[in-house]
Image (cartoon, rainbow, N blue to C red):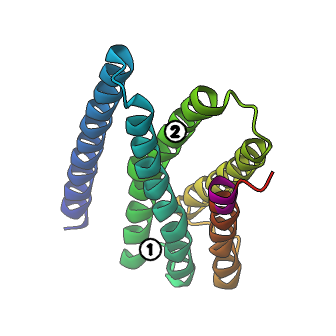
Amino acid sequence: MVNGDREIDEQAGRAARRKAFVALAIAALVIGALVYWRPSGLDLWIKAAHVIAVISWMAGLLYLPRLFIYHTDAPPGSDRSETFKVMEGRLLGVIMRPAMIATWLLGLWLAYSSFGFAAGWLWAKILAVVLLTGVHDRFARAVRSFAADERTHSARYWRLMNEVPTALMIVIVVLVIVKPF
């Protein structure tokens, strides 16, 4: 029965990846069409897509360490542990990674087209996003470790790590809205 369950999980995973790929392809086509035709409100469309990508990426950055907390307590090889592996892998690969890439590409477009990379606050924001990308990379390495049944950190560590994306998000939002320098 375990092999049957694994086969069903793999089919579901392939279907989820296919759906994510189709959604990304459609989004890329729409954005490409907008850039090509350059409608009068192009930057607003790009900004809307950027905000959607940021929200998706942040949702994953806030949820993934919660999964790690529960996964840390699950015995390696248990059904619960195997379920967390699937959840973590799909969250990272299907939602977080594409959202991070879209966030960067659209954000760089906006930084160039709207500010010419000339604003001081913008460089501080880019630094904070680089740090957020480092957190994303740290979480991606943890997904690989959990997939190999390695538990190198405690649940307490992951509770603390859960706060890092929130702190960086606050800095980024303040920089974008207040533009302190």
The answer to whether 51 is drawn above or below residue 151 in the figure is: above
**Label 1 near label 2: C-beta < 8 Å?**
no
- Find residue 88 and report its horizontal and vertical position in percent: 45, 62
* Magenta span of residues: 174-178
**Looking at the image, which is closer to me, 75 or 72?**
72
- Find residue 94 and report its horizontal and vertical position in percent: 38, 48
**Looking at the image, which is closer to me, 70 or 96?**
96
**Looking at the image, which is closer to me, 167 or 77?**
167
- Find residue 159 and report its horizontal and vertical position in percent: 64, 81
Q: Residues within 10 Å of mark 1 (few under 14, many from 20)?
A: many
Q: Residue furthest top?
A: 36
Q: Which mark is residue 81?
A: 1
Q: Which residue is mark 2?
A: 101
As shown in the figure, which amino acid type bears the numbered disc 2? Ile
At horizontal 45% and vertical 33% (from top left) the residue drawn is 43
* In-image side of 118 versus 93 (left or right): right
Report the quarter where the N terminus lies. bottom left
At horizontal 39% and vertical 55% (from top left) the residue drawn is 90
